[in-house]
């Protein structure tokens, strides 16, 4: 017997309850906006919605009937998941965008009749990176949506979506998931050992998908360890080692450089946030890097709140620059030098 996709969702009970209620009363919307950080579970919820809308079982979504199975297999007659496409450019982290041609083609297909009785769910991931003209076409479609089609837009930055598009969608927020359910899920559903599950759940910033990557991708975990060591020693030793690391992370040997660079920015930001919280409130709980709490504390004690805030600003700027397609290695080097300089100034105070 197969499991329905909604049963695989970790956390997000209010979102699921609302969808269950709306579907049970025939009040599902034709357009949803699922917001929340990357890897938190938005797309899984959307795929589960497609099962619910196409299930012929006695207790939908059953996970077992023809409709549920087709959705789970990603049959395009039932479910389409559209990712933004990479643009050109020399940086390893390519700018991504929903292109005009793709969106137009997609929308023209939705006008054609769907397979009898099927509700087709179209998931547009990272919807905020949509070309202006594509957004215009999307808006027109949402104003007069084709029958038996449900659009689900997912977004990490819903404020970057056009207000006119947002207003046509029913918004559901998927916030960070507490560590405990993530830990229990890793152990019960995937047989992960208690210690590994505890660390992964605590250090994933509430994103079950990232916790899963931690337990399945040892290389990612060791990258994190390496980075935390560098952050702990920031300003005390020359940032040369860190710059060498940046070069290695950006080399696309073995693929996945884009993901590594994004992870690196996330981890550095969480480190600075942890230290900032520790520095300004003295709070020991609610930090992401629970396995490096002592190092965070030492770091916070050596730095002032102003320097930590500057570091967070530098990280925000680096993220924006990355989206504008600048060279990722150069960007990381400049960022490291800036953070190291700030750290040295902080230590001298
Ligand atoms: Zn079913």
Image (tube, rainbow, N blue to C red):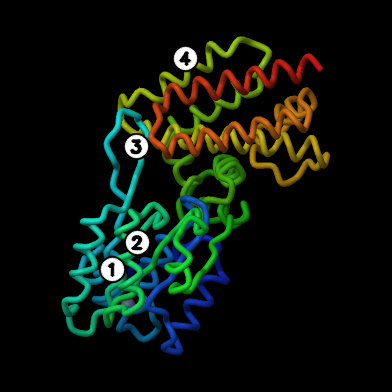
Residue 214's x, y, as percent? 48, 40
Which part of the image, by quadrant, shows the N terminus?
Answer: bottom left
Give the Cα distance between marks 4 and 3.
21 Å
Q: Earlier in the sequence, mark 4 or mark 1?
A: 1
- Camera-near label (2 vs 4) is 2
Q: Residue at x 27, y 74 (%)?
A: 120
Q: CA distance from mark 1 to mark 3?
A: 30 Å
Q: What residue lies at 73% left-to-right and 36% top-to-bottom?
A: 276
**Given this view, does label 2 or label 3 mark the residue nearer the observer?**
2
Secondary structure beneath dot 4 equals: helix
User: Quadrant location of residue 330?
Assistant: top left
State left or right for residue 234 relative to residue 192.
right
Local packing at callout 4 (Cα closer than 10 Å; few below 14, some 14-19, many 20+) is few
> Which tag is nearer the camera, tag 4 or tag 1?
4
Name the residue rendered at 45%, 57% in the picture: 155
Q: Earlier in the sequence, mark 2 or mark 1?
A: 1
Q: Which residue is mark 3?
A: 94
The secondary element bearing badge 2 is classed as helix
Q: Is residue 135 above or below residue 18?
A: above
Marks counted in the figure total 4
Neighbor class of circle 3 (other Cα within 10 Å; few <14, some 14-19, many 20+) is many
Pinpoint residue 18: horizontal percent, then vertical percent. 52, 77
Lateral position of residue 102 relative to residue 187, left or right: left
Disc 4 to disc 1, C-alpha distance: 45 Å
Mark 2 and mark 3 lie on one chain; the one further toward the N terminus is: 3
Secondary structure beneath label 3: loop
The residue that mark 2 highlights is 135
Reply above or below: 277 against 152: above
The quarter of the picture where residue 23 lies is bottom left
Q: Are marks 2 and 3 in contact (CB under 8 Å)?
A: no
The disc at residue 244 is 4
The residue lying toward the viewer, choosing from 284 and 234, is 234
């Amino acid at each position: 017997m197969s499991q329905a996709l909604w049963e695989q969702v970790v956390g997000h009970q209010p979102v699921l309850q609302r969808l269950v209620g709306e579907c049970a009363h025939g009040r599902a919307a034709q357009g949803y906006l699922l917001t929340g950080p990357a890897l938190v579970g938005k797309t899984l919820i959307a795929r589960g919605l497609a099962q619910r809308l196409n299930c012929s079982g006695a207790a939908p979504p059953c996970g077992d009937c023809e409709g549920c199975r087709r959705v789970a297999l990603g049959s395009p007659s039932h479910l389409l998941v559209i990712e933004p496409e990479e643009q050109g450019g020399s940086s390893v982290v390519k700018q991504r965008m929903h292109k005009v041609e793709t969106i137009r083609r997609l929308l023209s297909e939705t006008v054609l009749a769907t397979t009898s009785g099927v509700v087709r769910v179209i998931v547009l991931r990272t919807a905020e990176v949509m070309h202006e003209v594509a957004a215009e076409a999307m808006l027109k479609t949402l104003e007069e949506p084709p029958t038996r089609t449900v659009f689900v837009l997912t977004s990490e930055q819903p404020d970057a979506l056009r207000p006119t598009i947002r207003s046509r969608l029913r918004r559901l927020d998927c916030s960070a998931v507490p560590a405990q359910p993530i830990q229990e899920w890793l152990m019960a559903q995937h047989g992960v050992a208690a210690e590994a599950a505890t660390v992964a759940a605590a250090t994933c910033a509430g994103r079950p998908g990232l916790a899963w990557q931690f337990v399945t991708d040892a290389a990612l975990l060791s990258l994190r360890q390496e980075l935390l060591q560098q952050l702990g020693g920031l300003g005390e030793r020359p940032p040369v080692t860190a710059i060498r690391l940046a070069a290695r992370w950006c080399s696309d040997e073995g693929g996945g450089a884009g993901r590594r660079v994004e992870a690196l920015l996330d981890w550095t930001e969480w480190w600075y946030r942890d230290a900032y919280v520790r520095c300004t409130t003295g709070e020991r709980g609610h930090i992401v890097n629970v396995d490096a709490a002592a190092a965070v504390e030492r770091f916070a004690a050596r730095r002032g709140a102003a320097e930590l805030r500057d570091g967070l600003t530098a990280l925000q700027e680096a993220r924006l620059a990355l989206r504008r397609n600048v060279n990722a290695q150069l960007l990381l080097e400049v960022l490291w030098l800036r953070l190291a300089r700030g750290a040295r100034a902080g230590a001298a105070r």
